[in-house]
Image (cartoon, rainbow, N blue to C red):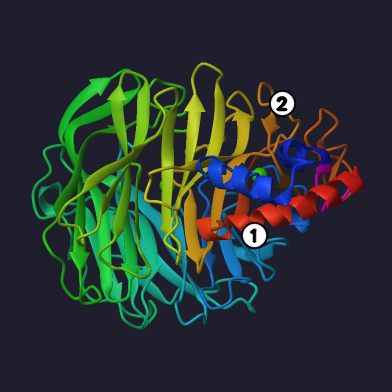
Amino acid sequence: MGNDYRPITRQIGHRFQRVGIMYGLSVATVIVLLSVAQTSRAAVINVIDVIPNSDSSEAFQNSEPSLGVNPLNPLQMIAGSFGNGTPYFKSVDGGTIWSDYGALSTNDKSIAWRQDGVAALTSTLQVLTTNPNGSLKTSQIQTFSGTIGASSFGTAINTLNPGQALDQPWIRTGPSGQTYEVYNNLSNTGGRSATMRVSSDNGATFASPVTLETVNPVGGQDAPSVRSAVSGSTVYAVFTRWGTFSSVTGGDIFSNSQVVVVKSTNSGASFSAGTTAATTTGYFSTTNNTPLTLGQQRTSSDVAIAVDPNTANHVLVAYGDRTGAGLLQLKVVESTDGGTTWTQKFTTSSAMRSALPALSIAANGTIGLLYASYDPNTNQFSQHLLTTSNDFATTDDSLLGTETNATPTIQFNPYIGDFYDLTSVDDVFYGIFSASNFDNGNPLTGALFPDVTFQRDFMGTPGTPSFELLNLAGNPVGFSIDPFFFSFDVPEPSTIVLLGTMLLGLAALRRRRL
Ligand SMILES: [Ca+2]
Ligand SMILES: [Ca+2]
């Protein structure tokens, strides 16, 4: 039993191999090897189960995770996921230790930190009424503000309740109190559902909502996910304009959908009409284990956007494409002229289905893409942080975890979430994903993490069949979906020599410890 155990043998398994190869070589040789091997620098990244030790008895499905990091003090962060209501968690040590930060009654939620560092903001959705067929009729979006010293978000500072069908709010912040909430308003005329509202006082008050969509989508609405990214006074938003509908096994697809990017250069006071960043086949499935899902995880409207913190004209979009029967792939397009023209840069493997993209660009220009994959042949999930420091000339795909889809069984939709979340401060990526905590070291029956840390109580050894969750009284607790946090500082190519030297030092250290 313990709450900060790290599975040392598996943690360094990968590193040890590399070290073993290098051992006995001269420093100069190692530097040369590392320089040559830059194209394959996938890393073993420590992932931390966010569930605090005090919550060791929980067995909820903590899906759909969000993360906010204080840009002025990245030791401070607040995360949230589904669970018993929507529990929130905070860390003041860079994500190593997490504690409870209250809970809100929400359907969806999103988190962003104020850029002045004062507080985190969360935007939440509450469904108020449904139609007889169960579809959304009315809902409200609320905004909450919480300081890191507080114990919860407290009461809402703003409520949007127009008596309409609002869905999936997503919050991001700008440098002078601007707060951008994008969402899908299914009550908008003509199915022009992609919408944003803008605050200039940290979410206390908002200007009238702006309908970002400017045409009536052929598919009847824009896809549920609307996302935004901010660089100074430049704000981008992206959504998928659904095209021609057809029904396939397991759900709906929308051919000739458009991935639309709109832009404001005046902190959201006005927006340009959208440009088409890509054409795709949209998809929507709220069932489970179909050719259109990631196992038990439903799929819909995967889209993400990131803007370069140093160059507002440099913007990236990731989106989902149903590229064939039983095949879902993520694609990344890039613009360096402020969204006027777009270039295809990256596509995930066609050997498995991928979704839940989250994008960020670090201060040093490194690009990060967090995503989930599902392999129908093995019935396994995997999570990945893909990074590139040379604009996708080469990419490093770091595997964060692999889990069976067979267990735990779904408690509600979404199984692991309609999104993951990734942000960055300076040169460090901060990400969060939800996955099974069944860390028996075997993704055929449980989960395998290259490097994981648990705060919740357990007995046995993580990564082995002896691993068992315990409550604080020492009694067994069932395995469940948990949120997992990670941070990752990508070394720039110029620092690779330094890394080589460090690895040699590490080699000696690790060998002694073995
Ligand atoms: Ca859980
Ligand atoms: Ca959702």
| Rendered image: mark on residue 466 | none
Quarter placement of the C terminus: top right
Q: Position of residue 303 (x, y in %)?
A: 33, 46
Q: Nearer the viewer, residue 440 or 502?
A: 502
- Indicate yes or no whether the magenta region holds residue 7: yes
Dot 2 lies on which element? loop
The secondary structure that most of the magenta stretch takes on is loop
Kind of residue at disc 2: Asn
Q: Residues within 10 Å of mark 2 (few under 14, many from 20)?
A: some
Q: Residue at x 43, y 33 (%)?
A: 354
| Rendered image: mark on residue 442 | 2
- Indicate yes or no whether the magenta region holds residue 52: no
Residues in magenta? 1-8
Q: Residue at x 45, y 42 (%)?
A: 395
Q: Which residue is mark 1?
A: 498
Kindly indicate the quadrant of the structure image that contains residue 149: bottom right
Q: Nearer the viewer, residue 331 or 198?
A: 331
Quarter placement of the N terminus: top right
On screen, residue 305 above or below 242: below
Q: Position of residue 152 (x, y in %)?
A: 60, 71
* Side of 350 relative to 238 (left or right): right
Q: Residues within 10 Å of mark 1 (few under 14, many from 20)?
A: few
Residue 308 visible in image? yes
Kind of residue at disc 1: Leu
